[in-house]
Amino acid sequence: MNVKKIAIAVAAALIVLVGVYLAGYWPQSRARATAEEQVRTLDGQLIAAQERLRVAELLGQVLTVKEVAARRNYGQAQELSSTFFDAVRIETMSTGDSVLRNALNDVLGRRDVVIAALATSDPAVTEALHELELLLRRALNFATPPSSTP
């Protein structure tokens, strides 16, 4: 009989031990799964924010080119625009956001017009650069200046 009592006591202890283990494991497992899901969500948000930041940096570059061209320093503007368009090409290939990619492709589509206008010291290049600025502002959902035409 003592053996039977010991076996029952061991079985009861084992059941209690498994119950305690599950009581501690189950909530922790769910908390971990929730935390991992939050990390995945935040990773996606971080990637999107980084893409937007890089495009905002491109906007800053085009504003610099525009300002230099407005001062009629076309040689420096041409150098800056070359760096700008190279950066746009790289960002176009790496972005996962289709809105940003489409805007960047539109910017690249206007590259030859800008380069040619800068090469010929055409003051109208500032208008072409302004259009690039607007493309990037719209893609980033930044405010755009009001139109001067009614």
Image (cartoon, helix red, strand yellow):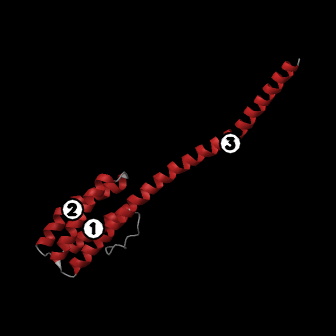
| Picture quadrant of residue 66 | bottom left
Badge 1 is on which residue? Answer: 131
Q: Which sits earlier in the primary sequence, circle 2 or circle 1?
A: 2
Residue 69 in sight here? yes
Disc 2 marks a residue whose amino acid type is Arg
Q: What is the quadrant of the C terminus in the image?
A: bottom left
Would you say the residues marked 2 and 1 are in contact, meaning their CB atoms lie under 8 Å apart? yes
Count residues near mark 3 (Cα–Cα under 10 Å), then give few for <14, some for 14-19, many for 20+: few
In terms of sequence position, does the residue under pointer 3 or pointer 2 come before the other? 3
- Residue lying furthest front: 2
- Secondary structure found at label 3: helix
Q: Please, what is the three-letter code of the amino acid marked with disc 3? A: Pro
**Residue shown at 10%/73% (left/top)?**
120
Residue highlighted by disc 2: 110
Residue 124's spot in the image, x, y percent? 18, 74
**Residue 77 percent coordinates (x, y):** 20, 74
In the drawing, what numbered circle is on residue 27? 3
**Upstream in sequence: badge 3 or badge 1:** 3
Disc 2, SS:
loop
Say which residue appears at 23% left-offset and 74% top-offset.
126
Using a 10 Å C-alpha cutoff, classify the residue at mark 1 as few (fewer than 14 neighbours), some (14 to 19) or many (20 or more): some
Image vertical order of residue 6 relative to residue 36, above or below: above
| Residue 39 x/y as whole percent | 52, 50
**Is there CB contact under 8 Å for labels 3 and 2?**
no
